[in-house]
Image: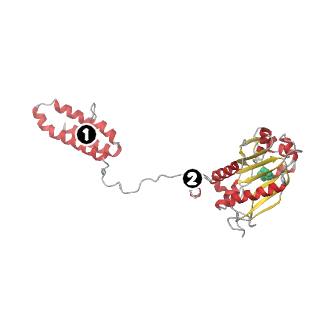
Amino acid sequence: MQEKLNQTEKDFKQDLTTKSGFDLKVKYLGRKNGLVTNLMKELATMNEADKKQWGPEINRLKKNVEEALEKMTTGEKQTDGSFDETLPGLELQTGTLHPITQITQELSNYFTAMGFMVLDGPEVESEFFNFEALNVPAWHPAREMQDTIWTEQPGVLLRTQTSPVQIRSMLKYGAPLYAVAPGRVFRYEATDNRHDHTFYQLEGLVVDENISVANMNAFLKLLVEKIVGDKIKMRIRPGYFPFVEPGVEVDVECAVCHGKGCGLCKGTGWVESIGAGMVHPQVLAYGKIDPKKYSGFAFGVGLNRLAQLKFGFEDTRMIHQNDLRFLKQF
Ligand code: PHE
């Protein structure tokens, strides 16, 4: 009996550091097979002399166990002092939306408020939508402008731009059409501060009667103001894209260096942010819209650049590095 008592006491002390209060209660005081309960049952069957000898011992053990469990549930200190209960607990971390998500949502809301549809398109795209229907046949030198990641299936690629959604939306909805399409695009590029193989664009398309270059310019100005505020300078200069005529590029004054020249703006003080232009009549025709009746403009916003301008960071690759030190800042 003495041995049993010692063993039970020893086990209990050890279990105390590893088991939950509930498990301890079941194991030692459980009505059916609790170790202490069984000792009590045994006590009841003993003769008077044994009862006298072991009764106090067994009762002492029972009391100890009960007291320890009581302390445990009231949260009183149990251990030998090696655990410092005054240390702060684990902090619950709240996440934030990724800068690209924030910009995408903000712009989508903005365009929705102006009556635009927000669309998406496939990231694995056909050569037809990504190039041919955008006025870039296989022999066209403009294919070189975008180093493409092809799949093993002929004619199937990772879209190099969100512009294929222009064609898809024209085919699906016809004119008049007011739509934006944010999304991920891919290019086979050497990466640096300003280039990544995977990045984000927002495509915009307006097709209606009597849409002019003046409408486009006014719209681009509004867009830049919305994105970076009206304090920041912008400029519109000619640019070449095969699916628009005329085509323009919109530069925004660098938000990191404010025009002085830095890594983000390659020392020029300006950051290319938007490509745009009047939709080429041939492209409207590919979208089964009558170019004699309708005209329109399209624009593509580089969301990585925009995030860099808005939040002021120099390396576009941060966007995909999942570095919490970076992400927590936004
Ligand atoms: N798709 C073009 C690019 O990725 C940008 C663009 C979109 C230009 C729409 C004009 C009109 O470079």
- The residue closer to the viewer here, 182 or 11, is 182
- The residue closer to the viewer here, 164 or 40, is 164
* Callout in the foreground (1, 2): 2
Q: Amino acid at mark 2?
A: Thr
Quarter of the C terminus within the rendering: bottom right
**Which residue is situated farthest in the left direction here?**
49
x 21%, y 42%: residue: 63
From the image, tell me which residue sits under label 1. 8
x 67%, y 57%: residue: 307
Residue 32 occupies which quadrant of the picture?
top left
* Residue 49, x across and y down, in percent: 10, 34
* Residue 65, x across and y down, in percent: 25, 42
* Residue 26, x across and y down, in percent: 31, 36
User: Which callout, 1 or 2, points at the residue further toward the start of the chain?
Assistant: 1
Q: Amino acid at mark 1?
A: Thr
x 46%, y 54%: residue: 91
Residue 302 occupies which quadrant of the picture?
bottom right
Q: For numbered disc 2, what is the local secondary structure?
A: loop
- Indicate whether 13 appears above or below 255: above
Residue at mark 1 to residue at mark 2: CA–CA distance = 52 Å
From the image, tell me which residue sits under label 2. 96
